[in-house]
Amino acid sequence: MMDKNKIKIVENSPKAEDYLHLRESLSWNTYSLSDTKIALSNNLYSVSIYYEYEIIGMGRVVGDGRLCFYIQDIMVKPDYQHKGIGTLILNNIIEYLKNTATKEAYIGLMSKKGKEEFYENFGFIKRPNDIMGNGMVIPHFESKK
């Protein structure tokens, strides 16, 4: 059983190494350390959750800081899933957005398949719907860098 007194919430970007370790623990694709450092330095907001001294989860927000916000990388290590850590992360992100975003701001995210219900509990809706089309991505972007 997890001792809730040993949970620490830190509102800043985790070290790039910790971010990559979280991604690896979830079998998500990883990036170079240098690219990860640049990406994390451009967060609008991030929250990391530590249990004792180990990072066990995080989430971040990217965007323009006023009108458009995108929730990214909600990650919880497998051994700590279904224990309220994801909810803790998203609650901190929602609080940041309430204090930062305009009333009309766009707040979006792309859910992992099968995780949509988690986000629906926070008021997110699926696309497509009667108002909005499908969310879309470029799956294999060919960068010149």
Image: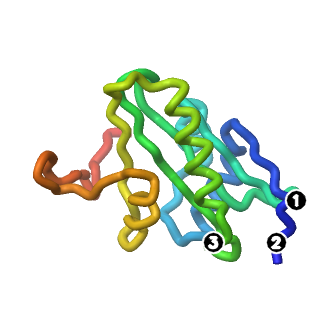
Q: Badge 2 is on which residue?
A: 2
Percent across and percent down for residue 8 are 81, 50
Label 2 sits on a secondary structure element that is loop
Q: Badge 1 is on which residue?
A: 6
Q: CA distance from mark 1 to mark 2?
A: 8 Å
Percent across and percent down for residue 28 are 50, 66
Label 1: few (<14), some (14–19) or many (≥20) C-alpha neighbours in 10 Å: few
Residue 117 occupies quadrant: bottom left
Closer to us: 145 or 21: 21
Q: CA distance from mark 3 to mark 2?
A: 11 Å
Q: CA distance from mark 1 to mark 3?
A: 16 Å
Amino acid under disc 3: Gln
Label 1 sits on a secondary structure element that is helix
Vertical relation: 130 (above or below) 41: below
Which residue shows up at 59% across the image and 47% down it? Answer: 91
Amino acid under disc 2: Met
Which residue shows up at 59% across the image and 57% down it? Answer: 87
Which residue shows up at 71% across the image and 61% down it? Answer: 56
Q: Which label belongs to residue 81? A: 3
